[in-house]
Image: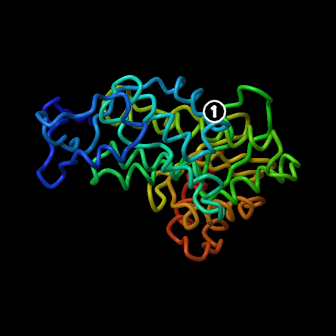
Amino acid sequence: MKKDLSRRDFLKGSAAGVVGLASVGLLGACAAKDPEPTATQGPIEAPAFPFVWHELDAAAVEDRVYKGFYTLGGCARTVFDGILGTLAEEYGYPYNQIPTQMYHSGHAGYNVGTLCGSMAGAYGIIGLFVPTEDQDAMVKELAAWYSAAAFPFYQPEEKMITTVANSVNCSESVTKWMEAADVAERSHPLRMSRCAGVSADVARKTVEMLNVYYGFAAAAGDEDNFECGENQYIGRANGYDGEMVVRVTMADGKISQVEVLKHQETPGVGTNAIDALPEQFKGLATAEEIDALDAVSGATVSSTGLKEAVKAALAQVK
């Protein structure tokens, strides 16, 4: 789904979007690399939307974001800077016209524990580089990934425990990890390293998604890569927002464990079923018993999809 944007389209703007000389002056230090416009040059046209995406090295951005967490004021700004700042350093205008300080307010879930700041920075990037008609799908994909991921992946210094938030909220993500890691203070160095790692993870995922979206990389085909051990079976079914994949472990003819390996359910809605139902499958042995389980309130479609996936796995048991 590569988007072909020419240099002419990139520079094309509308009369309504013209930025005057005074406005350029307000952008401050971020615009310092470009020469000041002269009277003969006239007004500077606003860049076309969406901004042109150039392929980025996800690993390099990941490392930059981890380090920037400590120097730029937290998760939101470092994710935004890690991606946009890299483009600004390499390509200049228009990427260097947006001050990354605007995302300083996003640290610590905007200070009230709401949306994880790293996601706020990533959503800002999506808003700049993705056409409006595709933004919802990409935002939803990133949210589903974040909710199901065992963070942090990126641990360049001290190794630590990982946890799954089942939410995009800062308070839930951080609190679950702190409880599991037995860390009491948010100022603890290990907690700081954890959130720096999560920021790096989110930035890398966002770069990978945009590289795929614009045709610089192929989408990862993970459909056939789920591993099974002895007495384990993979089941698939459609949830509310996409495919669900589960791994069911059997012991003595009954279900002993259900793991949700893949889903795209809405955080805080469909994920409620993913949180609640796996424990209820334990000890069941037939499709009829699975059908008899009550759906999670407010997540009926997701509950049904999860039950169907488990039944699909169970059907493979001989």
Q: Nearer the viewer, residue 277 or 145?
A: 145
The quadrant of the image that shows the C terminus is top right
Query: Mark 1 sits on what residue?
Result: 66
**In the rendered image, the vertical position of residue 10 relative to residue 280, given as above or below:** above
**Left or right placement of residue 34 versus residue 199 in this view:** left
Residue at the image point whose x is 45% and y is 50% from the top: 123
Q: Is residue 61 visible?
A: yes
The quadrant of the image that shows the N terminus is top left
Q: Residue furthest front?
A: 39
Q: Nearer the viewer, residue 121 or 1?
A: 121
**In the rendered image, the vertical position of residue 65 relative to residue 274, given as above or below:** above
**In the rendered image, the vertical position of residue 67 relative to residue 26, given as above or below:** above
x, y percentage for residue 45? 18, 42
**Label 1 SS:** helix
Q: Nearer the viewer, residue 185 or 24?
A: 24
Q: Residues within 10 Å of mark 1 (few under 14, many from 20)?
A: many
Task: Tell me the kind of residue under disc 1.
Answer: Tyr
x, y percentage for residue 273? 61, 65
Q: Is residue 244 visible?
A: no
**In the rendered image, the vertical position of residue 8 relative to residue 75, given as above or below:** above
Residue at the image point whose x is 64% and y is 42% from the top: 233
x, y percentage for residue 305? 52, 61
x, y percentage for residue 190? 81, 39
**Left or right placement of residue 5 versus residue 245 in this view:** left
**Left or right placement of residue 155 versus residue 87 in this view:** right
Q: Nearer the viewer, residue 58 or 109?
A: 109
Residue at the image point whose x is 19% and y is 35% from the top: 10
